[in-house]
Image (cartoon, rainbow, N blue to C red):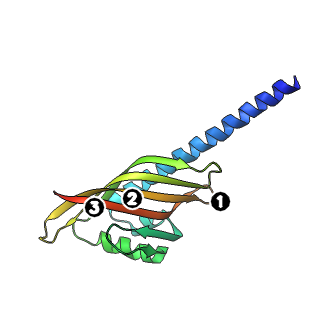
């Protein structure tokens, strides 16, 4: 009887841990999608920047590495001020560490901005974001890198 109780307890705990991982992963996907939504609106710099950790690093395609929330805020603000600028992405995959403290997401992205001729152009790309879970369970991005492919006129 004792063995059966231990086995049942073990199965329950294993199921609880698996459920936590699924919940953590689902929350990460939902967070990434909410971030994309906020970014695609292109209006609220603070709302978008709130998804990054204070010590975050971003690696924009073809541009210098940007470190820290203040520098990232400036980058986002400048991007939103570009006439016709638009960004969005679709989360492709997400994974969470076994202890639930770190995770990553991959995404396909779309950027629209004026080309050298002033006409709007759209580029698609891919990105990866590394996330850290805060003590209150919130996911914040600590490392964000992306690339983009050839222009596809809009």
At x 67%, y 34%, the residue is 15
- Residue 2, relative to residue 20: is it above or below? above
Q: Label 2 neighbourhood size at 10 Å, few (<14), some (14-19), many (20+)? A: many
Disc number lying in front (2 or 1): 1
The disc placed on residue 88 is: none
If the image is split into quadrants, where does the C terminus sit? bottom left
Q: Please identify the quarter of the rendering in which residue 83 is found.
A: bottom left
Residue under circle 3?
86
Q: Label 1 neighbourhood size at 10 Å, few (<14), some (14-19), many (20+)? A: few
* Outermost residue, right side: 2
Residue 60 makes an appearance in the image: yes
At x 13%, y 66%, the residue is 119
Q: Label 3 neighbourhood size at 10 Å, few (<14), some (14-19), many (20+)? A: some
Q: How far apart in space, not on screen, are marks 2 and 3 (Cα)?
A: 11 Å
The disc placed on residue 135 is: 1
**Which of these two is toward me, 50 or 150?**
150
Is residue 53 found left or right of 121 in the rendered image? right
Sequence-wise, the earlier of marks 2 and 1 is 2
């Amino acid at each position: 009887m004792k063995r059966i109780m231990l086995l049942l307890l073990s199965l329950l705990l294993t199921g609880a841990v698996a459920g936590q991982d699924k919940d953590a992963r689902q929350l990460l996907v939902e967070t990434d999608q909410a971030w994309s939504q906020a970014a695609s609106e292109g209006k609220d710099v603070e709302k978008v920047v709130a998804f990054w950790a204070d010590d975050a690093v971003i690696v924009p395609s073809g541009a210098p590495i940007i470190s820290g929330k203040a520098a990232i805020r400036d980058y986002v603000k400048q991007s939103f001020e570009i006439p016709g600028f638009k960004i969005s992405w679709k989360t492709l995959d997400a994974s969470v560490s076994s202890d639930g403290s770190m995770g990553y997401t991959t995404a396909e992205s779309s950027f629209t901005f004026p080309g050298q001729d002033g006409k709007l152009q759209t580029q698609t790309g891919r990105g990866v974001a590394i996330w850290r879970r805060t003590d209150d369970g919130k996911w914040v991005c600590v490392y964000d890198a992306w690339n983009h492919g050839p222009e596809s006129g809009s």
